[in-house]
Image (tube, rainbow, N blue to C red):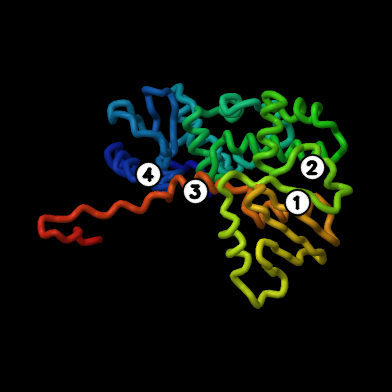
Amino acid sequence: MRAHQGDAGLDDESLYNLLVLRDPANDGRFLVGVLSTGSYCLPSCPARRPLRKNLRFFRTEQEALAHGLRPCLLCRPDWFSRREVWHEDYFERITAQVRQDPAGVPDTGSLAKFVGVSQAALNAWFSRHAQELPSSFLRRTRVKHACRLLASGMNANDVCTSGGFASPAAFHAQFARLTAITPVAWSALGTAEAFTLRLPANYAAREVLGFHSRDPEGICERVYENRITKGIHGGILTLQLDSAARTARCKFQGLDGWTAHQVAVRMLGLGQDAAGFERQFAAPPARPACSETGRPPPSH
C-alpha cells in the first residue's frame, strides 16, 4: 500500500476530475478537503460529493491537518497513511471486542458511537464486510455469547444479564430464533443423546428433504421419507422432521451434543434468513417495457 506522497504534477482541476472517478488507485496521490464538514478524505471515499466550491486538495496529510481538517470517519485516510486498512483491520478489531463483551454495546446506536461513525455509515460498513445489518450482528453475537456461558454452567438469568439482552423475554425469543431450542435445552446438550429443534412457521420441509436427497448414491447422507441420516466427524446424526408439529427430532452417536446441534441447524438452514430471501425474490422479475414496435427493447 502506498503512503501519501502527493502528486505535484497535477493542478486542482485535474485532481477534481480524478476525484469524480472514485478510483481507489488514486488513494495516496492526493487528499480531498471538505470545508463544509471540516474533514479530509481519500479520493475513493464513498461519501456524497460536496459542492465544488467547498473542496480543497492537499498533497499530504500534514497539509490537511495544518488547514484545521480532521480525518474522514468513513474512508479513514489516517489509517491509510499508517498503511493499515481501515475497513478490514478496524472491522475485525471492533467485532472482536464486541464479541468479548456484548453487554457493553446494547444497541446499534451505541455500536455506531463505539466505532466512531454515523448510523448510516455503520449500516454500509456491515453490509460491505458482513453482508448483514448491525442489529443482526448484535443479536447473533449475544446469542453465541450466551451459548458459551450456558455451556460453562451459568444459569439462564445470569446469562441474560451478562449477554446484554434487553429483557428475559428478549433473551428467550432471540435465543430460540437463532438456535431453535430453549436455553435450558441448550444447557442440557452436554449430556443429552437427543434433542428437538423447533421449526419456523411455513418451514419448507419438503424442499429441505429434496435437497439432502439430491445424490441417491451418496454414502455419507441418506434420506428415508422424512428422515435424514448423515455421517460426520466419525459419528452419525439422524434428523426426523415432523411438519405438522413443526419439529425436527435429532438423535446422534459419536458426537457431542453441541456439535450435533451445530450440524443440525446448518443442515436444516435454521441459521439463515430464508424469510428475507423469499421476500426479496418472491415476485417474478419485471418484464421490460415494450417499444412502439411491440417488441421488448434490445438488451445491451
The residue at 60%/24% (across/down) is 110
Q: Where is residue 156 in the image (x, y as percent from the top left)?
A: 80, 31
Which residue position holds label 3? 277
The crowd level at tag 2 (other Cα within 10 Å; few <14, some 14-19, many 20+) is many
Element under disc 1: helix
Which residue position holds label 1? 261
Q: Which residue lies furthest to the front in this view?
A: 244
Q: Which mark is residue 22?
A: 4
For the C terminus, the quadrant is: bottom left
Q: Which amino acid does label 1 sit on?
A: His
Q: Which amino acid does label 2 sit on?
A: Trp
Q: Earlier in the sequence, mark 3 or mark 4?
A: 4
Which residue position holds label 2? 186
Marks 3 and 4: which is nearer the front?
3
Q: Do the residues labelled 1 and 2 touch (CB within 8 Å)?
A: yes
The crowd level at tag 3 (other Cα within 10 Å; few <14, some 14-19, many 20+) is few
The residue lying toward the viewer, choosing from 284 and 201, is 201
The residue lying toward the viewer, choosing from 60 and 84, is 84
Q: Which amino acid does label 4 sit on?
A: Arg
The crowd level at tag 4 (other Cα within 10 Å; few <14, some 14-19, many 20+) is some
Q: Which of marks 4 and 1 is nearer the N terminus?
A: 4
Q: Rounded to the nearest whole Å, what is the CA distance between mark 3 and mark 2?
A: 28 Å
Q: Name the side, left or right, on which 161 lies relative to 282.
A: right
Marks 4 and 2: which is nearer the front?
2
Q: Are marks 4 and 1 in contact (CB under 8 Å)?
A: no
The residue at 79%/64% (across/down) is 236
